[in-house]
Image (tube, rainbow, N blue to C red):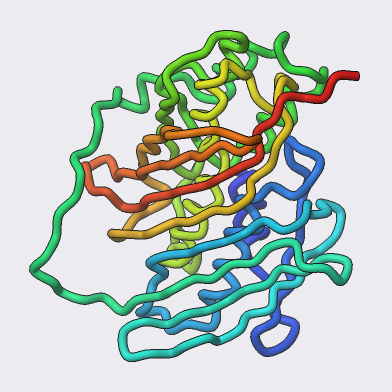
Amino acid sequence: MNDALQSLLDLLALEPIEQDIFRGQSRASVVPRVFGGQVAAQALVAAGRTVPADRPPHSLHAYFLRPGDSGAPIVYTVDRIRDGRSFTTRRVVAVQHGKPIFHLTASFHAHEEAALEHQEPMPAAPDPLTLPTQAELLPRYADRFREPDMLQRLLEARAAVDLRYVEEPPFATPGTARAPRSQVWFRTDGKLDGPQDRPLLHVCLVTYVSDMTLLDSVLLAQGRGGWAVGDVVGASLDHAMWFHRPLRADEWLLYDQESPTARGGRGLGTGRIFAADGRLVASVVQEGVVRAPREG
């Protein structure tokens, strides 16, 4: 396990400060605010701490309310909405400087054996080991980034995750509109074992990664390079996930993403996450602000 992955796991190891109240630390990201995937993952950790281990999360629905301050801790308050026979519901509010910055509702479900089951087939994708790593890919486009230190910031932000683009990312082709579809393979850059090998933690790590590239398909459709290039401004507005089957964040997962629409300064991204054996393990939907920078 590399130091970056251990640092991410430490970030998800929330400190309990009172019953159903937890404190999480923050760290700088590529943009001048807390990375949305971090807040979502920490909130899901907080919710999961109040639920029996035999009830994994099956869905979450969240809103990003205010930009997070990466220099300050975040307090997560969990509201125990419902404890039913099969389903458990939790609401989490993340607060910084006395104001809510994020709201999440998560539902947990006890395992059921059911005869009704189907899924879409996994789309075609190359073997991830044939694709360049971030350390190999990002330096090729360093001259397109808006700030001299952007390359290093991107590499540090993604160092805990082995993420590999199937096709060229948006920052490779700014100014050229492409089909609004993107694929990446990802896994943690190291295995989880011992006390860290917990189903909830795997789901929280996938939640963390799910916010990294989901709006890429919106950028591709508009011929925009993205936040690193500086030809758009934006932020995540909301985020929803459904977890269909057991998954491991330290094994290869294919994130198949597309954008059905963008209008009025907002773009919609949808994604399906498949295990390497073809199982559909999660679905994701997010809307974000995507605008051209203001002149002057």
Give the quadrant of residue 252: top left
Q: Position of residue 274 (x, y in %)?
A: 31, 43
Give the quadrant of residue 235: top right
* Vertical placement of residue 134 versus 86, above or below: above
Q: Position of residue 85 (x, y in %)?
A: 32, 90
Image quadrant in which the C terminus is located: top right
Q: Residue at x 47, y 51 (%)?
A: 206
Side of 256 relative to 157 (left or right): left
* Vertical placement of residue 8 versus 267, above or below: below
* Vertical placement of residue 111 versus 2, above or below: below
Residue farthest front in this picture: 264
Side of 219 relative to 254 (left or right): right
Q: Residue at x 37, y 53 (%)?
A: 248
Q: How many marks?
A: 0
Q: Residue at x 53, y 79 (%)?
A: 90
Q: Position of residue 25 (x, y in %)?
A: 76, 61
Q: Position of residue 43 (x, y in %)?
A: 61, 67
Give the quadrant of residue 290: top right
Side of 233 relative to 120 (left or right): right
Side of 278 relative to 145 (left or right): left
